[in-house]
Image (tube, rainbow, N blue to C red):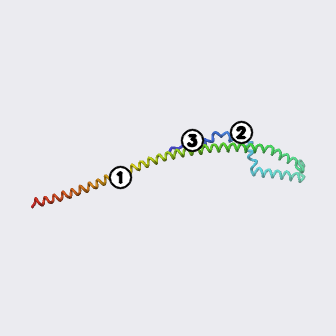
Amino acid sequence: MSERAPEKHHWRFHAAHAHLNAVFGDDWFAHKAESFARFFGTPTFLIAQTFIVLVWIAVNLAGWTSFDVYPFILLNLAFSLQAAYAAPLILLAQTRQAERDKANSEADALHREDLARASAERQAQMKLQSDVLLKMLGQNNDLTEQVSQLMQQNIDLTKTVGALSARIEQMTAEMRSRICQ
């Protein structure tokens, strides 16, 4: 079988959905927004945020500074601001990821259909080849029978010729004995 041409590569089904790969668009802000949204769920972010909050509270409780005394209104405002920006970015990232997943599943379904069609074509070709092979095997059996019959006829003919030769020899011997007497 011949190899598939490069344009027949299985990723060709995903090409129509390439525009969905950039979640927030393709400009610099979109790339930064997507990386920011992805960073929110990482252990690095959670550990860093926890460390900053603990330092913030320790510095203010120890009295080293008094820019945000207990009940930490400024810290609460910072969390609210962070949530106000993070929530829409995360929701947008989830929505676009769902769109990408749907598009990729559609492309995968098309790929599976293409594979099934190619498999069905191969099976049909194999059936044709099997039928041809069975026909050739039948012809081979017929030829083998014919050769066997010819060989049997040849053996029978050889026996007949041998019997005739023996009979001729016997008659020749009888004639010699009668003539020579």
Q: Amino acid at mark 1?
A: Glu
Name the residue at 80% across, 50% down: 49
Looking at the image, is mark 2 or mark 3 earlier in the sequence?
A: 3
Of the pair 161 and 37, the residue shown nearer to us: 161
Residue visible at 75% across and 49% down in the picture: 41
Compared to 49, does 32 lie above or below? above
Classify 10 Å Cα crowding around label 2: few (below 14), some (14-19), many (20 and above).
some
Front residue of 20/155: it is 155
Residue 3 locus on image (x, y percent): 53, 44
Query: What residue is disc 3 on?
Result: 8
- Quadrant occupied by the C terminus: bottom left
CA separation in Å, label 1 and label 2: 76 Å
Element on which disc 3 rests = helix
Disc 1, SS: helix
- On the image, numbered disc 1 is attached to which residue? 145
Question: Residue 25 has which mark?
Answer: 2
Can you say whether 47 is above or below 31 in the image?
A: below
Q: Position of residue 17 (x, y in %)?
A: 65, 40
Which comes before the other along the chain, label 1 or label 2?
A: 2
- Residue nearest the observer in this picture, 102 or 93: 102
Q: Nearer the viewer, mark 1 or mark 2?
A: 1
Q: Secondary structure at mark 2?
A: loop
- Give the residue type at disc 3: Lys
